[in-house]
Image (tube, grey):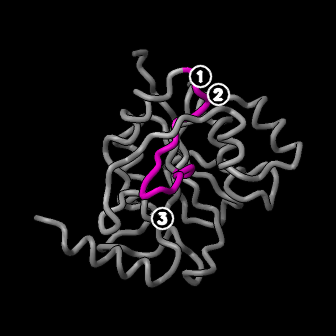
Amino acid sequence: MIAISPVIIIAAGGNGERIGGGKPLRTLAGRRLLDHAIDWAKAQSDLVALALKDAAQLPPSDLPIRLDRQPGLGPISALDSAFRFGAEAGRAHAVLIGCDQPFLPPDLVTTLASRIGTHGAAMPVSLGRDQPMASLWRIDEAALEQFIAGGGRSLWRFASVVGAVSVEWETSAREDPFANINDLDHLAKAATRFRNRAP
């Protein structure tokens, strides 16, 4: 298997209205959600960046920031940023994650890299749900630009266009590593999950 060394983009530009705004800066287990995401990403890649709508959304960071080229497109804008960031660095693959996924598995990238083959993406499937926000993508700027120009906005649809392979992930509802935090109830449940972790 050819070694794959993807860039990782953390999508942190959403409004977070359901959680009262400022989602990346919300605290979980004494640390910002963004910090949990950064730690995970840095353990997986030597090239990590943040995808934002506006640089003023977050305090200054030592990580590169990639701003949406077109407003109002949703997560597909972050994937566009990931592809541009990866292409600039001469990398062939990119991983897009959200800032609200504090339980991502440590073997995610290596597992997906072993399965992507010639496919355009490798997408985890957990509890019957596709996880485009934790997928490994083969960088294809032309295909993504064409998709967006044609009105495409869905990560799921783009994954279908590029021929993503599904990767089943064994897990349980209580320990779903792809669980994301959308509201204060999710945040409280995540805090309980952290407390219940074995020392």
Residue 15, position as x, y percentages in the image: 65, 72
* Residue at (44, 29) in percent of width and height: 115
Q: Quadrant of residue 146?
A: top right
Kindly give the residue lying farthest to the right in the view shown. 150
Q: Quadrant of residue 192?
A: bottom left
Residue 17, position as x, y percentages in the image: 63, 79
The amino acid on which the numbered mark 3 sits, given as a three-letter code, is: Asp
Labelled disc at residue 90: 1
Residue 186, position as x, y percentages in the image: 43, 78
**Quadrant of the image for the N terminus?**
top left
Badge 2 local density, few (<14 within 10 Å), some, or many (20+)?
Answer: some
* Residue at (42, 53) in percent of width and height: 38
Which type of secondary structure does the marked residue at label 1 adopt?
loop
Real-space Cα separation, disc 1 to disc 2, in angstroms: 5 Å
Labelled disc at residue 87: 2
Which type of secondary structure does the marked residue at label 2 adopt?
helix
Real-space Cα separation, disc 3 to disc 2, in angstroms: 25 Å
Labelled disc at residue 100: 3
Chain part drawn in magenta: 118-133
Q: Nearer the viewer, mark 3 or mark 2?
A: 3
Q: Is 128 in the magenta?
A: yes
The amino acid on which the numbered mark 2 sits, given as a three-letter code, is: Ala
Badge 1 local density, few (<14 within 10 Å), some, or many (20+)?
Answer: few
Residue 130, position as x, y percentages in the image: 53, 52
> Are the residues flagged by discs 1 and 2 in contact, CB closer than 8 Å?
yes
Kindly give the residue lying farthest to the top in the view shown. 2
Who comes first in sequence, dot 3 or dot 1?
A: 1
* Residue at (89, 43) in percent of width and height: 150
The amino acid on which the numbered mark 1 sits, given as a three-letter code, is: Gly
Numbered-mark total = 3
